[in-house]
Image: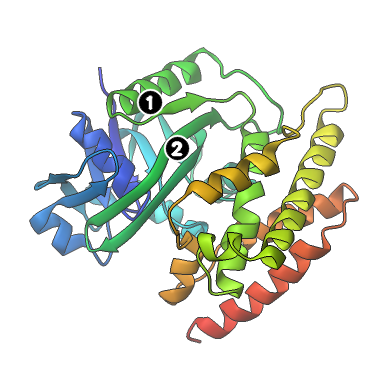
Amino acid sequence: MALSYAIIGTGAIGGYYGARLQQAGCDVHFLLRSDYEPVRDHGLTVESIDGDFTLPQVNAYNKAQAIPPVDVAIIALKTTRNPLLPELLPALKPNGAILSLQNGLDVEAGIVDRLGAQLSLVPTILGGLCFICSNKVGPGHIRHMDYGKLLLGAHNPENQPCPPPALLHSILHSIVEDFTRAKVDTETTEDLPMARWQKLVWNVPFNGLSVVLNATTQEMMNDENVRSLITTLMAEVVTAANTWAQKVSPESDRKLPDTIAAQMLTQTETMPPYRTSMKIDYDEGRPLEIEAILHRPMLTAQSVGVATPAMRLLYQQLSFLNARNIPQ
């Protein structure tokens, strides 16, 4: 039996995956801000390499309190809006879960910290990584250009790899079934922290440099000097990730694949020219996710004795641009 879902943040990510779930027959509820009236009146439109479709009617809300209790609340907001989570999350059914589809490091722990100050009992927390090229091109209008895979895992407070317990496994399995029925390639991982590090190998250079250089992925890949800088940033992330993993799990062989940087460069070469999510945020005058994507990994690297000079320089540049770009 399909679960019920609330999509918190109906943009390029939440709009796409939420629409897929509704298309597959799930009970889905969308929380919106500026797009509330257009989506309420006209639904959602998805242009996709896997086939275009329109949902002329969706359950649209502009207040979380109006959403009925659901099994899963999917957080698809930018991490810059996480301070608002206590007022943006709807009620959950018994044994319900929160699934974060956000970028960055320590995302789930941050959600627990924020909710713990507001709730007597923090619900089950899951994390998901979205490997997708998708943009919101208009109110309720999503353009899916490439990929689409989801990788889901359970939050572990000690940052250790672990299979989820029985109850958690049950809801995680049901979520995977729903997304699979929605034609979304979905897998699970027992090591969510390392999966987050792995995605940062791409997100740190491409999101950050796209803003600093005012460039698409293709433009960056076509320049030899920029490609060299991308490789340097990737190497810093990999070194930080592997050193951190050995510190928290000294008797394990946790590490990122040796070929991860080369694989990501090859995949990016085959992508259509892509304006990253951070570049879109910058162009639209929105706060940048530099704390979750750059600052937190830098601090973690520093805590285990790894220097990240290229990441630090990129973070400093983005901090300046972000402060100048946001109206005071």
Residue visible at 71% across and 28% down in the picture: 160
- Asked which secondary structure carries label 2, the reply is strand
- Horizontal and vertical percent for residue 283? 44, 75
Q: Residues within 10 Å of mark 1 (few under 14, many from 20)?
A: many
Q: Residues within 10 Å of mark 2 (few under 14, many from 20)?
A: many
Q: Quadrant of residue 5?
A: top left
The vertical placement of 249 against 69, above or below, is above
Q: Amino acid at mark 2?
A: Leu
Residue visible at 81% across and 40% down in the picture: 244
Q: Which residue is mark 2?
A: 99
First in sequence: mark 2 vs mark 1 = 2
User: Tag on residue 175?
Assistant: 1
Callout 2–callout 1 Cβ contact below 8 Å: yes
- Of residues 3 and 244, the one nearer the viewer is 244
Residue visible at 29% across and 53% down in the picture: 143
Q: Amino acid at mark 1?
A: Ile
Kindly give the residue lying farthest to the right in the view shown. Answer: 305
